[in-house]
Image (tube, rainbow, N blue to C red):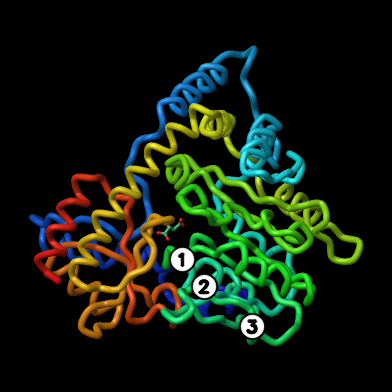
């Protein structure tokens, strides 16, 4: 018997499977058909390096505290313990940005925050760069929002700017270093967006999840740009910075000046989180705090250098083969044009079948991603070297 309730019909407007679920399904089918496979994944951006030792120590200590009635803790504060919010504020101080701990809202992931922020925003026009992390589009479609795209391409270095966009208020999503292209906004280009948002009363949702991979002189935070405090929320994560994909910890910054009329966006977010979220485990928050200490950052840096080393190994093969790509220098992702005019999914099948390598088809990141392909450097060194040899032979 069928239920007589109404469902959220907006879910009919998104692809049946989330991009990385679709890839996992296809890879599982391949492995099933060929049990002796030696598939290597350069697909989803999942880390492989173990957690930094200082993080492990902090987790052990916090676990012991949880096992002692004198130091046991129950529900964590919805927005994070003060010690973590302060550690994050200090992290910003190190890059010359002044925020108060109260402006920082810790959570269990940047993906959660990116998806959940739709809750506190009304029926705005959404402006999304294409190609980009699919959660921006999917979460807005699920809420029935109207979405417009700005195209990233070879000509603009996959860094679209607001020159030819009609001047009205939008909710704008930016990701820098960009997932999937690895392209990074410099201060000048980012300022164009901040100025546009200021002029039009738009909100920028700035995803800085990959900022720790920036080696050259690019902004690590949108708050480096004057005026950003009145128009931008920033979302950042421990996933890629500290290897927390399986631990889960992130944060969003809602500056005090971010208001709609008399309403602070931070007040809406606080209200949302208090209602729908019960905070991150104490053990995880202590782990995150440890990652942001001087020694913690040093240990995190070692893993980041390791991944960037992997990116160089892959990038060198692409260069040798004359395949154009972006990213890999200030980003863990390499974004390449599919050889021989293959479509993204054709190249996906070709790589999987001929070299047992998994990547991510560019078309999964938007229409402008068709004909492109993403490889991640988050594998082990050993697998990356094998993958590089296979690419050399195949391409
Ligand atoms: C990716 O591969 O794009 C990321 O791992 C996805 C994510 O961070 O959720």
Give how far across and how far down residue 30 sits, in percent.
Answer: 18, 65
Q: In the figure, is residue 121 to the left or right of 156? A: right
Q: Quadrant of ligand 1?
A: bottom left
* Among numbered discs 1 and 3, the one appearing first in the sequence: 3
Q: Are marks 3 and 2 in contact (CB under 8 Å)?
A: no
Residue 4 visible, this angle: no
In front here: 123 or 52?
A: 52
Q: Residue at x 36, y 43 (%)?
A: 305
Q: Is residue 309 left or right of residue 355?
A: right
Q: Which corner quadrant holds the C terminus?
A: bottom left
Distance of label 2 from label 1 (alpha carbons): 7 Å
At 23% from the left and 45% from the top, the residue drawn is 381
Q: Mark 2 sits on what residue? A: 159
Determine whether label 2 and label 1 are within 8 Å by CB: yes
Residue at screen point 59% across, 39% down: 280
**What residue is disc 3 on?**
163
- At x 16%, y 64%, the residue is 391
- Secondary structure of residue under mark 2: loop
Lateral position of residue 192 relative to residue 55, left or right: right
């Amino acid at each position: 018997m069928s239920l007589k309730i109404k469902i959220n019909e907006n879910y009919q407007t998104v692809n049946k499977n989330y991009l990385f679920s679709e890839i996992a399904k296809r890879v599982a089918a391949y492995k099933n058909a060929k049990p002796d496979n030696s598939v290597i994944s350069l697909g989803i951006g999942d880390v492989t390096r173990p957690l930094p030792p200082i993080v492990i120590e902090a987790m052990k200590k916090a676990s012991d505290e949880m096992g002692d009635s004198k130091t046991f803790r129950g529900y964590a504060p919805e927005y994070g313990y003060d010690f973590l919010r302060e550690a994050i504020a200090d992290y910003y101080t190190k890059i010359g940005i002044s925020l108060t701990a109260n402006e920082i809202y810790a959570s269990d992931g940047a993906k959660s925050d990116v998806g959940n922020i739709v809750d506190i925003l009304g029926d705005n026009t959404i402006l999304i760069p294409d190609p980009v992390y699919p959660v921006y589009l999917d979460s807005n479609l699920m809420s029935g929002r109207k979405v417009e795209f700005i195209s990233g391409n070879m000509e603009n270095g996959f860094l679209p700017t607001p020159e030819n966009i009609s001047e009205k208020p939008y909710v704008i999503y930016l990701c820098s270093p960009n997932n999937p292209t690895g392209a990074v906004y410099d201060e000048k280009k980012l300022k164009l967006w901040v100025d546009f948002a200021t002029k039009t009363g738009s909100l920028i949702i700035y995803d800085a999840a990959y900022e720790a991979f920036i080696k050259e002189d690019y902004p690590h935070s949108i708050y480096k740009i004057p005026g950003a405090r009145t128009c931008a929320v920033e979302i950042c994560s421990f996933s890629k910075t500290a290897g927390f994909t399986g631990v889960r910890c992130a944060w969003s910054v809602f500056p005090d000046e971010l208001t709609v009329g008399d309403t602070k966006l931070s007040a809406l977010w606080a209200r949302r989180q208090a209602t729908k979220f019960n905070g991150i485990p104490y053990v995880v928050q202590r782990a995150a705090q440890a990652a942001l200490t001087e020694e913690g950052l040093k240990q995190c840096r070692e893993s980041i250098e390791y991944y960037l080393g992997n990116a160089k190994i892959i990038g060198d093969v692409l260069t040798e083969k004359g395949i154009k790509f972006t990213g890999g220098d200030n980003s863990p992702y390499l974004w390449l044009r599919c050889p021989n005019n293959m479509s993204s999914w054709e190249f996906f099948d070709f790589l999987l079948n001929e070299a047992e390598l998994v990547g991510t088809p560019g078309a999964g990141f938007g229409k402008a991603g068709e004909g492109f392909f993403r490889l991640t450097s988050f594998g082990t060194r050993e697998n990356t070297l094998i993958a590089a040899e296979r690419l050399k032979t195949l391409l």
